[in-house]
Image (cartoon, rainbow, N blue to C red):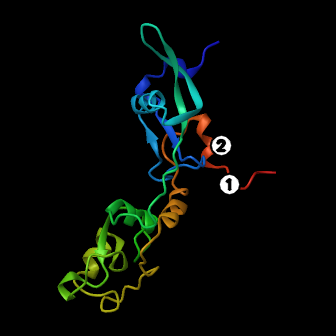
């Protein structure tokens, strides 16, 4: 019987990585490893294979189905607070301009401009579209009469993970659904 995985190139077979408690290491970006890294971790006995693709890789005397879901054997405790990066900032603000609500042409803006002593911190930087950033200029939101939708805060990793669930990745293998959406309300 024909299965689409059989013609899939191995590079198109990433492995979803679960922590030792069988929850994803990360939702956004989704924690996936290339097939080579997953196979290496299997042979080093660092992971358990939870599900596989139909696609196999072979050596002279061995064949192995590529893992599609793996679970770490040792629990990795995520840090409480994420790194301050452009991507994490956009994720905190749900990829939305905090002044007008647009989803396009995004950049970031210092709430209190650096020229007025503002610092580059979670509490002073927000996602803004280019037109709003240009309109606000070197003023505070109050000076520019541009109120923020939500006051900026320092997010926790849990906070970003919750936001990340709203933005599913472009590729989800069938074997991943049970592990990514186990806590989603079931349909009647």
How many labels were placed on the picture? 2
Compared with residue 149, is residue 84 higher up or lower down, i.e. above or below?
above
CB contact under 8 Å: marks 1 and 2: no
Crowd class of label 2 (few under 14; some 14 to 19; many from 20; radius 10 Å) = few
- The CA distance from mark 1 to mark 2 is 9 Å
At a point 46% along the width and 27% down the height, the residue shown is 43
User: Disc number at residue 96?
Assistant: none
Under circle 1, the secondary element is loop
Report which residue position mark 1 lands on. Answer: 183
At a point 54% along the width and 22% down the height, the residue shown is 5
Under circle 2, the secondary element is helix
At a point 47% along the width and 29% down the height, the residue shown is 13
Report which residue position mark 2 lands on. Answer: 178
Rendering quarter of residue 97: bottom left
- In the image, 62 versus 187, the foreground residue is 62
Indicate which disc, 1 or 2, sits on the residue closer to the N terminus. Answer: 2
Task: State the quadrant of the N terminus.
Answer: top right
């Amino acid at each position: 019987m024909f299965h689409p995985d059989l013609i899939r190139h191995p590079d198109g077979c990433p492995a979803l990585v679960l922590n030792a408690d069988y929850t994803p290491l990360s939702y956004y970006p989704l924690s996936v490893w290339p097939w080579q890294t997953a196979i290496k971790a299997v042979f080093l006995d660092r992971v358990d294979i939870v599900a596989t693709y139909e696609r196999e890789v072979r050596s002279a005397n061995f064949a192995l189905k590529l893992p599609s879901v793996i679970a770490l054997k040792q629990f990795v405790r995520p840090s409480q607070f994420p790194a301050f990066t452009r991507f994490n900032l956009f994720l905190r603000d749900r990829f939305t301009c905090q002044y007008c609500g647009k989803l396009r042409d995004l950049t970031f803006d210092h709430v209190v401009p650096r020229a007025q002593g503002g610092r580059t911190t979670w509490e002073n930087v927000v996602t803004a579209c280019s037109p709003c950033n240009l309109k606000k200029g070197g003023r505070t939101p109050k000076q520019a009469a541009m109120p923020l939708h939500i006051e900026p805060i320092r997010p926790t990793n849990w906070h970003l993970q919750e936001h990340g669930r709203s933005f599913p990745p472009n590729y989800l293998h069938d074997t991943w659904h049970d592990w990514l959406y186990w806590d989603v309300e079931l349909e009647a």
